[in-house]
Image: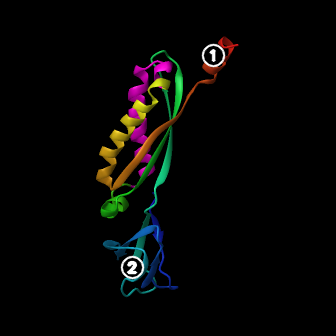
Amino acid sequence: MAQQSERGCLPCSNCFVTVPQDKTYAVEKFGRYSHMLQPGLAFVGADCCGCCVTFRSITSRVEQNTVMVQTKTKDNVFVTAKVAVQQSVIATKTVDAIYELASVHSQIDSYVSDVVRSSLPHMTLDEAFEKKDDISNNVQEKLVAEMATYGFQIHKALVTDLVPNAEVVQSMNEINK
């Protein structure tokens, strides 16, 4: 979801630009937002040496952000939770998605960490494995509510893995022999 600076399709000029199918461009004239460009070829106005008109782009594809969160359970076991979040830009809020947040991935990481660290310490290790879906639902509810204001739609948030620390895994393997 990182926004990128883009260039026009003619050397030393940004008069014409070709917007790829999976992106949307924001046009800036002298550093100020002007309008959005949809995929295809577009003429954006006169530009002298590529310094008057600039572009920022953002992808319309669904992207996945993987967050690793380490926390302690109720029975004092350190666990690393791996959470996968799939997000995309809301088509009608593309301007917000480009200009509101500097780092979408960092913001999502913060929200996921907050929810996981407030949920797992109230569960034992066994309960954490049993309630992975509940944790996923809590993360998704939080992200849907918070990220919509920044122009992002959350498709799914999944706890894909819970890994206890190595000593606990080794102890459990010894018990099961």
Q: Does 125 appear in magenta? A: yes
Residue 168 location (% of width, % of height):
60, 18
Q: For the image shown, how many numbered marks are present on the structure?
A: 2
Closest to the camera, between mark 1 and mark 2, is: 1
Amino acid tagged 2: Val
> Image quadrant for the C terminus?
top right
Of residue 45 and residue 142, the one placed in the foreground of this image is 142
Please report the bounds of the magenta region as a residue range: 102-128
Position in image of residue 159 (x %, y %): 48, 36
Which of disc 2 and disc 1 is earlier in sequence? 2
Image quadrant where one finds the N terminus:
bottom left
Q: Quadrant of residue 56?
A: bottom left
Placement of 129 over or under 48, stated as above or below: above
Q: Which residue is mark 1?
A: 172
Instruction: Decide: is 106 above or below 68.
Output: below
Numbered circle sitting on residue 53: 2
Is residue 174 shown above or below 148?
above
The secondary element bearing badge 2 is classed as strand
